[in-house]
């Protein structure tokens, strides 16, 4: 690797939990060089997960990173939906019938 192909790392996001001792870091990783086909290196997504003494670092293609982000978003939405108040049929019936009573008759 020449000086022109130095690895560039740009930190994009960080999430951590001091109580659990975990950190998640997302980076844009690229070089100043070109790929084998002669195009400029657009890079990839670096994902680091650290928990106390263990650390996992992986590089993802942009497509794989978007797929993973989508699945994480879906999972988080499912968890949040379980915490929402479920519809109360009796309350909805009373609200509906009250609305009918409040509407003026023709």
Image: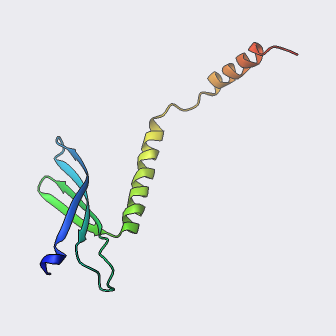
Residue at x-position 18% and y-position 44%: 20
Specify the farthest residue to the right.
106
The answer to whether residue 49 is left or right of residue 101 is left
Q: Where is 43 relative to 98, above or below?
A: below
How many tags in the picture? 0
Q: Where is 13 relative to 93, above or below?
A: below
Q: Quadrant of residue 57?
A: bottom left
How far across and how far down the image is residue 94, in percent? 68, 19
Residue at x-position 33% and y-position 80%: 39
Closer-to-camera residue (53/38): 38
Q: Where is 36 relative to 33, above or below?
A: below
The colour scheme of the drawn protein is: rainbow
Q: Quadrant of residue 102?
A: top right
Q: Quadrant of residue 101?
A: top right
Specify the farthest residue to the bottom.
37
Residue at x-position 22% and y-position 73%: 32
Residue at x-position 18% and y-position 71%: 7
Quadrant where the C terminus is found in the figure: top right
Quadrant where the N terminus is found in the figure: bottom left
The answer to whether residue 19 is left or right of residue 28 is left
The answer to whether residue 28 is left or right of residue 101 is left
Closer-to-camera residue (92/106): 106
The answer to whether residue 20 is left or right of residue 75 is left
How far across and how far down the image is residue 29, in percent? 24, 66
């Amino acid at each position: 690797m020449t000086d022109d192909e130095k690895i560039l790392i740009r930190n994009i996001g960080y999430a951590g939990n001091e109580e659990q001792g975990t950190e998640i870091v997302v980076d844009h990783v690229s070089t100043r060089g070109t790929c084998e086909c002669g195009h400029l290196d657009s890079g990839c997504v670096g994902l680091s997960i650290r928990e106390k003494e263990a650390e996992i670092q992986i590089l993802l293609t942009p497509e794989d990173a978007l797929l993973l982000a989508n699945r994480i978003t879906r999972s988080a939405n499912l968890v949040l939906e379980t915490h929402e108040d479920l519809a109360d049929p009796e309350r909805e019936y009373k609200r509906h019938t009250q609305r009918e009573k409040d509407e003026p008759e023709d």
